[in-house]
Image: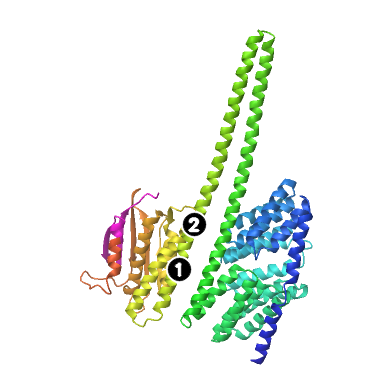
Amino acid sequence: MRKYVLFVFFIFQSVFTVNAQSISLKDSLLQLLKKLPNDTNRVIVLNELGFEYRHTKPDSTYILAQQAVELAQKLKFLGGEARALGTKAAAFKFLGDYAKSLKMYNQAFELNSKLGDDYRKTVILNNKADLFMQQGDWPKALKTMKECFVIYNTLPNPPAGSKPVYFSNMGECFLNLNQLDSAKFYFTQALPLAEATKESILTTIYYLLGDMALAENNLKQAYSFYKKSISNAVTENRFSDLFESSIRMAKLFQKTKKSDSALYFAKQSLVFAQKGAYLGGILKSSEYLAKLYKGKNDTEALKYYTIAVTAKDSLYSQDKVRQLLSINFEEKEKAQQIEAENILNKNKIRLSILIGIITIMIGIALILYKNNKQKQQANKILKDKNEEIEETVAQLKATQVSLRAKNAENELLLKEIHHRVKNNLEVVASLIALQSAKINDPEIQDAMLASQNRVQSMGILHQKLYQSEHLGFIEMKNYFQNLSENILDSYNQTDRIEVDINMEEIELDVDTAVSVGLIINELLTNSLKYAFPNEKKGNIKLSLENLDKDNLSLKISDNGIGKSPNTKTIGTGFGTQLVELLTRQIEGSFHEKNDNGTMISINFKRQKAT
C-alpha cells in the first residue's frame, strides 16, 4: 500500500510542473506566422500550428486549416493543400462532425494520390481508421487499417515512428473485435519499436495492453501496464494520455471493489482533461464520476452531472462557431462571384455605350449639329438610367446574400434551442431518477420510472431535431430505435427482450412525432411489464408504415401471454388513458387483437409540417 501511495504522489507531483515545451512550440509558431509572407512556408506553418491546437481548440484548428487551404490553392501548392485538408479533417473530427471529417480525409487522399506520395496516403488511411474508431465502427476501422498496411509494406524507407502507431491501431481494432490473439500479435510488434524510438504512441500502447490484460481478467498485469502508461505520460507531459490512463485505472479499481481508489483516479482524470482543455475527456470523466456517486452521494452526483451537461454545451458551442465560420466562407465566395458578375456586366454596358458613341460620331458627319446635340442628350439620359439599374441590381443581390446568411444563422439558433430543451429534459429525468432512489414503495418507484421514460422520450426527439438537417420533420425509424433501447435499458431487459423494428424510413411533423413517441413509450413499457412474466424471454415488433399518401398505420405486437377481454386493468390505468388521449389528438383509431400475444394498431392521418 505504501508503494502505491508513493507512486501516486510522484506521478501527480510531476504532472503539475510545467507544460513549457508545448507552450514554447505554439508561441514560436505564432511569432513565425506574423513574419512570413503569403508563400509556401506560411502554408506549412499554418498547418503545423493548426495541428498543435487540434486537442484544445479544434475551432482554431479549423480556421488555420481553412486559411492554409485557400493560400495553398492560390499558390498551386498541392502538397500543402493535401496536408491542410488532413488538418481540417482533424478539426471536424474533434468537433464531432464525422461526416465532414471523412469527406476532408477522402479529398486529402485523392490529392496525395495525384502527387504519388504513398507515405502520406498511409497517414490519411490511419487517421480515417481512427475516425471510425471514435464512432465505434471497428469493422470499418480494421478494413481501413488493412488498406493502410497494403500501401505501407510497399514503401522503400518509411519513417520509423509510423510503424508502432500503425501496429498499435491495428491491435486496438482486433482488441475491440475480441480477437485477442491477433491484438496481442500487433501490440507485441508495436511495443519494442515504440520503446526504441521513444515515440509518444508508447503511452497508448501501454494502456491498450492494460485493456487487453483486463479483457483476459489478468488484473495484476492490467494494473502494471496502466501504471507504466501514467509514468510515460508524465514524462511527455501529455494531458490527454494522462486522462486516458487515469480513467482506465479508476475503472480497474472499481472492478476490484476499491471504491476510494476508483474515485481518486476518476477525479484525477477530470483534472487532467480540464488542464488539457480536452472537452471530450471532461464529459467522459464527469459522467463517470456522476455514475460512481449515484445512490451514494446524490449532491456530488448532481454536481458532476452538471459539469457533464456544461461540457456538452461547450462542445455544441464549438460546433456553432464552426458552422458560423462555414457560413461566412460560403457567403464570401458568393460575394466574390457577385462582384465578378457586376464587373462583367459593367464591361458589357461600357462596350455598348462605346459602340453607341462611335455610331453617334459617325452620324455627326452626316447630320446637322442640332440633331447631333439632341442625340447626345438622349444618350446621357440612357446612361444614367443604366447606372441606376445597375445600382438597384447590386443592392438586390447584396440583400439576397444578407438574407441567406441571416436565415442560416436563425436555423442554427433554433437548433441550439432544441439542444437546450433536450439538456433540460435530461436534467429533469435525472432529478426524477435521484428522487426515486430515495423511495421504497415499488408502485411509486414504477410510476417515477414511467415518468422518467416519458421525459426521456421527448428528450430523444429534441436531440434528433437539433441533429437533423430538417427542423420540421423527425425520421421515425432511428427515433424508435433510440427510444426502445432507452426503455429496455431503464427496465434492465436488454438481454431478455428483443425489439424488432421492421419499417422504412418515414418522416413525421414534430407535433405528431411527440404524440407517437409517447404512445410507443406507453405500449412498449406495458409489454415489458405484463407480457412476459416469470423472466420469460420474448420478442416485440414495432413498425410504422404508409397505408396511402394521407394515412399511416402504427403497429406494436408481442409474443407474450396476451390478455382476455375480461382481464382486469393492472396499475393506475393512467398509461391507457394517456394512449387514448394521444390517439384522439392525432385523429387516430385504436385497434387491439389478442392471438398468441397482443397486437395493437393505430391508424391516423398524416399532418403536413409547416
- Indicate the amino acid at tag 1: Glu
**Mark 2 surroundings within 10 Å by alpha-carbon count, few (fewer than 14), some (14 through 19), many (20 or more):** many
Work out whether residue 181 can be spotted: no
Instruction: Tell whether position 589 is magenta.
Output: yes
Residue marked by disc 2: 415
Residue marked by disc 1: 426
> In this rendering, is residue 88 above or below 440?
above
Q: Position of 126 compared to 437: left or right?
A: right
Give the CA distance from mark 2 to mark 1: 17 Å
Residue drawn 68% across the image and 88% down it? 6
Report helix, strand or loop for mark 1: helix
Q: How is the image coloured?
A: rainbow
Residue 490 image offset from top left, x and y in percent? 42, 73
Tally the numbered discs.
2
Residue 125 image offset from top left, x and y in percent? 66, 60
Is the Cβ of the residue at disc 2 closer than 8 Å to that at disc 1?
no
- Residue sticking out furthest to the left: 566
Q: Which residues are magenta?
A: 582-610
Residue 511 image offset from top left, x and y in percent? 37, 56
> In this rendering, is residue 115 above or below 339?
below
Q: Which of the numbered marks, if any, corresponds to residue 344?
A: none
Q: Does label 2 or label 1 sit earlier along the sequence?
A: 2
Residue drawn 55% across the image and 83% down it? 254
Image quadrant where residue 249 sits = bottom right
> In this rendering, is residue 336 above or below 412?
above
- Indicate the amino acid at tag 2: Lys
